[in-house]
Image: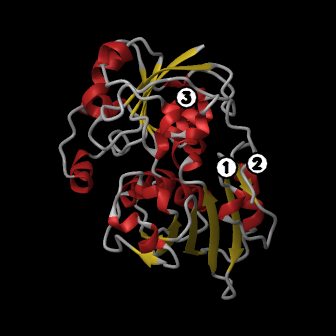
């Protein structure tokens, strides 16, 4: 059994890790940390976990975490890079759900997250945890920087087109809608029901943190800089990401459906829908799957890709478990096969 520690177990992504790992046949969660809730049972904070875990929260302690095979960090940005070096030196693998190990450029990290990176040696070897792009590297990694939710849905929508060289690399637009759980469990005015119900609004139009991930990873796919205008929007739903991506085709005759089906035919967690279909966020709720549909606009020179995920699963904790499975040589679908929830 793989011995797991979760640092930061009181937020939505930490609770989602517990939910997923409770049904994982090769995992035992033995450390669950929270300074604020130390001594309290996890199922008291999240009653949905009753009967699935008897763990209590404890204060973070590196010595205790060293007894784990892998530690997930479901923490604010800046926490994982403080604790990871000592854990990795002790042979513990790291999957970080924050942004500490996503960006290779430390100047970009400081620009977006307003702090210096304190573990640059580990950053240099860390692998960006999107299996559809970096599966082989993830298998050999000691440190994973788990992707952001917007970045995941956007990259899966655009990567096949850029890899095939069938679209222009500038003038790309990614319009992303997100559920409120993406803001976390902390009490904030902008996350209150009366502030978010019956409402749709854009935010971070002049620059969102996930832009840097999108630029970094799609640039690798394209073999050079990619110009993506990314704008997120907050919607009155709890879970879900819906990205609508637009790009200009170099060749109007390309069979887009065939291109996407070929690229993702062996991917267990990417579902390319039939031609003409439109994915819904509710069709991925609670599941570690990205559903994609590709269309050609009426002008025949614009490709429109629709990409939906659950921001807490494929956009966070489910993808983190998928990476863990790969790191330990397991079937990457273990613990992740449950179908999404409808209605």
Element class at badge 1:
loop
| Residue depicted at x 76% and y 68% | 255
Nearer to us in this view, 237 or 62: 237
Q: Which mark is residue 265?
A: 2
> Label 3's element?
helix
Question: Which quadrant: the C terminus?
Answer: bottom right
Q: Mark 3 and mark 1: span between their CA atoms?
A: 16 Å
In percent of width and height, residue 293 lies at 71, 66
Snapshot quadrant of residue 127: top left
Label ID, residue 324: 3
Q: Name which residue lies at 53% across and 33% down.
A: 43
Label 2 or label 3, whichever lies nearer to me, is 3
Residue 92 seen in the figure: yes
Which of the labelled discs sits on residue 1, or is there none? none
> Residue at coordinates 66% horizontally, 88% vertically from top-left?
299
Image quadrant occupied by the N terminus = top right
Q: Which residue is mark 1?
A: 289
Relative to 147, residue 305 above or below: below
Q: Are marks 2 and 1 in contact (CB under 8 Å)?
A: no
Q: Earlier in the sequence, mark 3 or mark 1?
A: 1
* Of the two numbered discs 2 and 1 in the rendering, the one whose residue sits closer to the viewer: 1
């Amino acid at each position: 059994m793989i011995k797991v520690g979760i640092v930061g177990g009181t937020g939505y992504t930490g609770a989602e890790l517990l939910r997923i790992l409770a049904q994982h046949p090769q995992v035992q969660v033995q450390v669950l940390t929270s300074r604020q809730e130390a001594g309290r049972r996890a199922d008291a904070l999240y009653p949905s976990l009753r009967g699935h875990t008897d763990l209590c929260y404890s204060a973070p302690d590196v010595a205790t975490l060293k007894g784990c095979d892998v530690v997930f960090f479901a923490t604010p940005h800046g926490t994982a890079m403080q604790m990871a070096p000592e854990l990795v030196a002790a042979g513990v693998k790291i999957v970080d759900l924050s942004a500490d190990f996503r960006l290779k450029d430390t100047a970009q990290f400081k620009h977006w997250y307003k702090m210096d990176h304190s573990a640059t040696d580990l950053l240099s070897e860390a692998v960006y945890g999107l299996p559809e792009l970096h599966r082989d590297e993830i298998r050999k990694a000691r440190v994973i920087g788990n992707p952001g939710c917007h970045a995941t849905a956007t990259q899966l929508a655009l990567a096949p087109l850029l890899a095939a060289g069938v679209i222009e690399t500038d003038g790309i637009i990614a319009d992303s809608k997100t559920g409120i759980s993406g803001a976390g469990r902390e009490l904030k005015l902008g996350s209150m029901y009366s502030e978010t119900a019956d409402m749709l609004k854009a935010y971070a139009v002049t620059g969102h943190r996930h832009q840097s991930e999108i630029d970094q990873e799609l640039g690798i796919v394209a073999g050079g800089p990619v110009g993506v205008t990314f704008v997120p929007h907050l919607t009155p739903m709890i879970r879900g990401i819906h990205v609508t991506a637009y790009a200009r085709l170099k060749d109007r005759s390309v069979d887009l459906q065939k291109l996407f089906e070929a690229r993702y035919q062996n991917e267990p967690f990417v579902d390319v829908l039939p031609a003409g279909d439109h994915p819904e966020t509710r069709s991925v709720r609670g599941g570690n799957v990205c559903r994609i549909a590709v269309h050609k606009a009426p002008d025949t020179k614009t490709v429109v890709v629709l990409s939906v995920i659950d921001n807490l699963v494929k956009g966070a904790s489910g993808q983190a478990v998928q990476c863990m499975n790969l790191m330990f040589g397991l079937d990457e679908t273990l613990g992740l096969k449950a179908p999404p929830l409808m209605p």
